[in-house]
Structures are given as C-alpha cells and as structure tokens.
Image (cartoon, rainbow, N blue to C red):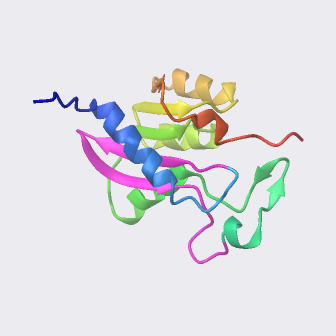
Amino acid sequence: MTEHQRPSWDEYFMQIAFTVAQRSTCDRAHVGCVLVRDRRILTTGYNGAPAGLPHCDDVGHLLIDGHCVRTLHAEQNALIQAALHGVGTEGATAYVTHQPCLTCAKMLINAGIRRVIYAGNYPDEHSRAFLDEANVELVRVAWPRPADTVFQPQQS
C-alpha cells in the first residue's frame, strides 16, 4: 500500500488560492485570495473588474503609472464578499498567491486579518512594514509553481 501524504493546512489553502486565481480576468496577473478562520473557508476573491463592468480580457487594460486600474485586487474582492454576505474576518488568515500591495495590506489590517501566507513576491516594502507594525504575521512559502513569473510590473 502506498503512503498518501496529505498537504498541511497552509499547503491546502494555498492550493485553493491558486485555483481561485485561475478565475482572474486580468492577464497581467492572476491572483487569488482565500480568507480562512479555524480551518474553514470564509470567502475567496480574485483580481478582476467590478461586477458588471468589462474585463481586461475583453477590452484591454486601463494602465495608469504602470498599474491596471480597471481591476480590483484579489484581497479586496475577498473582503468585499465577506462584507456582502455578513461574514466576519476578525482573526482570519489570508492565503494569497502574491504578497499584498500596500492598499490591500491596509485593508487586511483593518479587517482584522492576523496572518498572511503568500507565495509570489511583490516589490512593496511599505506593505511588509505596515503588516509588521500591525502585528500581522507575514509568511512567504516556497511554492512549486513559479508565482513570481505571473506578475511582471510595468516599468514607468
């Protein structure tokens, strides 16, 4: 009989975040987020245009200073889903395919997120500093998928 090795909880939820990222509608970055508390999924989110508006995949990017402003970020969508459905996020963990940007970090802090587990790097020292100052644990995990190649920031 072969021995089946189950993933750790962090690996399990990170796999789900990468699956959620496949729903992204912006080809510049496929980012997924899963909010979890007590090993239960609260909400998920991926980056894409606001509901009812055209997607980057359909009409192209709206770039300002090298960033696509047409889309909401995965973390923002996960938090919005929690708000829309009356789901509290205090004390939860965010599993994100990429390190949160500064705006998302601030939103996660205010939503009471206590841990952020991510795979792909995002070049934002302020984000890391804010999360650290707010005592939010930030953990980068090694991941077999090359998450860093998914996001390539545009040079301004």
Residue 6 shown in magenta: no
Q: Is residue 85 left or right of residue 58?
A: left
Residue 68 place in picture, x, y as percent = 75, 55
Point out residue 36 in the picture as x, y percentages from the top left corner.
32, 43
Residue occupying image coordinates x 69% and y 30%: 124
Q: Residue furthest front?
A: 1
- Give 91 or 68, whichever is nearer the viewer: 68
Residue 60 lies in quadrant? bottom right
Query: On the image, which quarter does residue 13 sit in?
Result: top left
- In the displayed structure image, the side of residue 156 where residue 7 appears, left or right: left
Quadrant of image for the N terminus: top left
Residue 63 lies, in percent from the top left, at 82, 56
Residue 63 vertical position relative to residue 11 in the rendered view, above or below: below
View extreme (left): residue: 1
Expressed as whole percent of the image width and height from the top left, the position of residue 10 reads 34, 32
Residue depicted at 84% across the width and 54% down the height: 64
The answer to whether residue 77 is seen in the rendering is yes
User: Residue at the location (39% across, 57% down)?
Assistant: 82
The span picked out in magenta is 29-54
Q: Tell me what residue is drawn at x 68 percent, y 67 percent.
A: 57
The verdict on residue 44 being magenta is: yes
Image quarter for residue 156? Answer: top right
Viewer-side residue, 73 vs 88 = 73
60 or 84: nearer the viewer: 60
